[in-house]
Amino acid sequence: MDALLQRADRCSADAFACGALQPIRTEQTWLDAEGLRFSVRWVSSLALKDRARVDTVIRRRPDFNPFLPPEPALTVAAIGEHHLVVLNKFPVIERHLLIVTRAFEPQTAALSDSDLLALAKVLRAHGGLGFYNGGRIAGASQAHKHLQWVPSTAAALTPFVPRSCLDRPGYAVCNPALPWAHAFVGLEEHAWRDDTAAGQNLRAALQTACAALSMPARAQSMPDYNLLVSRECLLLVPRTQEKWQDVSINSLAYAGSLFVRDHAQIERLRAAGALAVLAAVGRPG
């Protein structure tokens, strides 16, 4: 896994050259809320064709599965027997990677030990932020199971993590400043000594977070939720709505990164307040 990002960069360059990779150009601003800063990206007004790409991303076609198989030009590497690392075809963030199951599994299925091991391998080698949109209401645009990863420069949990989470790894805690149901679980630093230990630690932390929120950890069809994982901690957020008004909310919003289609949506977010927006699509705290 140490060379994964170098392989991803080479794959990105080749895929962009042949047209398989179609980045969405964005502009960026910031919203501040209760001492927390949120990045808001929107489609550049100078890139009209990118609007069509956004429409392609959000348009759900039940009969279309881009991961079975994934485009060869976008396929970076295998992780174990059950997963592939694939480039996001329409990235808003550079080095945005998808960890996709080779065989079809629904996005609503519980994360398996092999799913968590695949994510642990990427996090152990490269840090950053892994996340999972567990179901349509949680922001999943594809029904085929896929975890995601972005570098720490794109989004980070650190500003949202309460000190008690890092002081008491292995226990579920909440941040009183966040007005929605959630559970942080700190991860032991020594658990990253090897891939297997890291995967097992993620499984234990996920089970702890699920128990704290009265959610099943291994249901055949899970309730909708967002999962975010760094090397320091895991965050689980149950979801009740996919959108706030017409703004889609996925896992990255809970790490301070929002995406909107146009500037008008930003002004509505600013007026409502980022914390109120996230509370509206989550379970009451």
Image (tube, helix red, strand yellow):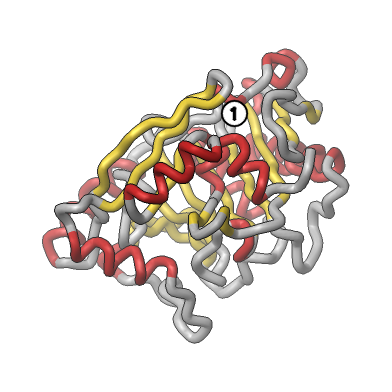
Report whether 268 appears left or right of 189. Answer: left
The residue that appears at 60% across and 65% down in the rendered structure is 136
Looking at the rendering, which quadrant does residue 107 occupy? bottom right
The residue that appears at 60% across and 59% down in the rendered structure is 242
Front residue (pair 272, 88): 272
The quarter of the image holding the C terminus is top right
Front residue (pair 174, 68): 174
Query: Among all residues in the image, which is located at the extreme bottom?
Result: 63
Q: Position of residue 238 (x, y in %)?
A: 72, 49
Q: Position of residue 220 (x, y in %)?
A: 78, 67
169 to 3, vertically: above or below: above
Q: Position of residue 101 (x, y in %)?
A: 54, 65
| Residue 112 in view of the camera | no
Which residue is under mark 1? 192
Looking at the rendering, which quadrant does residue 18 occupy? bottom left
The residue that appears at 36% across and 58% down in the rendered structure is 88
Report whether 39 appears left or right of 170. Answer: left
Q: Position of residue 156 (x, y in %)?
A: 49, 30
49 to 138, vertically: above or below: below
